[in-house]
Image (tube, helix red, strand yellow):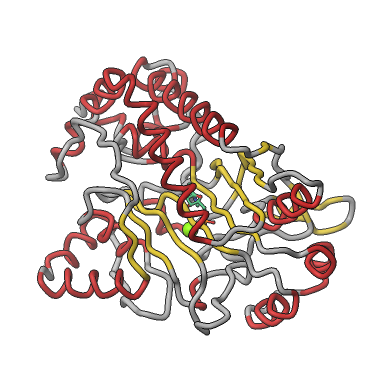
């Protein structure tokens, strides 16, 4: 017989009565933290001059750069529309419009995103099909300005949740058997990150990973065992695959940034350095202790010719982006921003075995629970 605790931390949770789970006091505590984290994010952004907009849910196009996830299409009065995988193009538009109106040009959404993530992500513990991305954009800014806001936001939220660390401790203790069973350390305190956070270029991050694996080839076995996948090759010219993102996250004890990704790694909207061809003005914020990616951001490509060239390279159908290209042609200005996943942030703060434990109706790739 599995204990109740063991049941809560395995996918067998879903064979139980959902009401029993959602009404469990530990789960209710997690939902309270979720609520508080949302409030603290709004507090921080509003203090810093950001205006919240309701996010858009449907449009003729959505973000195509979603690392192998599928978009969801709906029939919108006879036309194919997409449910937002990310409302990135709309926030660029709104930040520019707000700036044009004479204001600071800082905007954000609590955006509901839907992505049919690849099946292998189900074992990564950080992918949901439905999640919230706090998505912000700043006019007249670049990726370094956005990184500064990202680290200050994380610092603020952690300092606010730490005011009530007793609540967190009860959650950490509940999941202790899980971490022990995996031979991993259990969280006993939530450290306030030291700012500025470390910043590695993509090239430096790949070098760190190559050296780490060379020094300790056991990591390959650990990746196979933990995620039930065959590790891919590490490369200077591609995205950092999930398993390596986990590895670099595991060997760090503080959140950190990776910036300057290669051009092939990201969508057409991440701007290429005008003087460093092939390198994008973008970044990821990564949690330590194996929790992986927290946020992705960039300075946006706003020069229409460059956007069209990038769209053609990745096979986008330009006519679907009519409104966006019109906007860039007539009103495009430099903007930068990022999106931070709310459930991943709550998972990190609560030190939860998996992201799905943050929500009462979690959708895990490939699992028909609700
Ligand atoms: P992306 O544009 O793919 O980098 O997404 C922005 C942020 O949203 C990521 O950094 C994550 O924190 C979060 N995110 C992306 N995909 C998922 C997912 N499938 N489940 C939960 N959070 C996600
Ligand atoms: Mg990302």
At horizontal 13% and vertical 70% (from top left) the residue drawn is 217
Q: Is residue 278 above or below residue 156?
A: below
At horizontal 58% and vertical 68% (from top left) the residue drawn is 270
Residue 293 located left or right of residue 335: left
Please say whether residue 366 is visible from this viewpoint: no
State which quarter of the image contains the N terminus: top left
**Residue 158 horizontal/vertical position (percent):** 36, 33
At horizontal 18% and vertical 31% (from top left) the residue drawn is 188
Residue 157 located left or right of residue 213: right
Q: Is residue 246 above or below residue 218?
A: above
Determine the image quadrant of residue 272. bottom right
At horizontal 49% and vertical 45% (from top left) the residue drawn is 341
**Residue 243 horizontal/vertical position (percent):** 31, 62
Q: Tell me how many marks there are.
A: 0
* Foreground of the two, 187 or 70: 187
**Residue 237 horizontal/vertical position (percent):** 41, 80
Determine the image quadrant of residue 298. bottom right
**Residue 42 horizontal/vertical position (percent):** 56, 31
């Amino acid at each position: 017989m599995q204990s109740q605790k063991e049941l809560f931390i395995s996918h067998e949770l879903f064979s139980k009565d959902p009401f029993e789970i959602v009404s469990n006091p530990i789960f209710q505590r997690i939902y309270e933290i979720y609520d508080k984290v949302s409030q603290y994010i709004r507090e921080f952004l509003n203090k810093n001059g950001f205006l919240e907009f309701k996010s858009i849910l449907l449009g003729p196009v959505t973000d195509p750069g979603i690392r192998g996830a599928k978009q969801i299409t709906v029939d919108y009065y006879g036309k194919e529309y997409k449910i937002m995988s990310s409302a990135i193009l709309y926030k660029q538009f709104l930040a520019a419009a707000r700036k044009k109106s004479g204001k600071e040009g800082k905007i954000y959404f609590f955006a509901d995103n839907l992505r049919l993530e690849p099946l292998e992500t189900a074992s990564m513990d950080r992918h949901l099909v439905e999640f919230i991305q706090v998505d912000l954009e700043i006019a007249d800014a670049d990726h370094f300005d956005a990184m500064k806001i990202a680290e200050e936001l994380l610092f603020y939220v952690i300092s606010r949740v730490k005011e009530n660390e007793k609540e967190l401790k009860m959650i950490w203790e509940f999941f202790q058997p899980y971490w022990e069973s995996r031979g991993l350390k259990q969280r006993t305190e939530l450290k306030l990150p030291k700012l500025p956070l470390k910043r590695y270029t993509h090239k430096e991050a790949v070098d760190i990973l190559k050296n780490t694996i060379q020094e300790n080839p056991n990591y390959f076995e650990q990746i196979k065992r933990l995620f039930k996948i065959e590790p891919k090759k590490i490369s200077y010219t591609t995205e950092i695959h999930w398993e390596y993102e986990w590895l670099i996250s595991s060997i760090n004890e503080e959140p950190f940034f990776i910036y300057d990704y290669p051009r092939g790694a990201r969508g057409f909207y991440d701007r290429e350095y005008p003087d460093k061809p092939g390198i994008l003005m973008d970044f990821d914020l990564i949690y330590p202790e194996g929790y992986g990616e927290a946020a992705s951001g960039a300075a946006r490509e706003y020069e229409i010719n460059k956007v069209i060239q990038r769209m053609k390279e990745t096979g986008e159908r330009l006519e679907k982006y009519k409104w966006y290209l019109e906007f860039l042609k007539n009103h495009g200005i430099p903007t930068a921003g990022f999106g931070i996943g709310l459930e991943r942030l709550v998972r990190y703060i609560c030190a939860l075995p998996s992201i799905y434990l943050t929500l009462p109706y979690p959708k895990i790739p490939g699992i028909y629970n609700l």
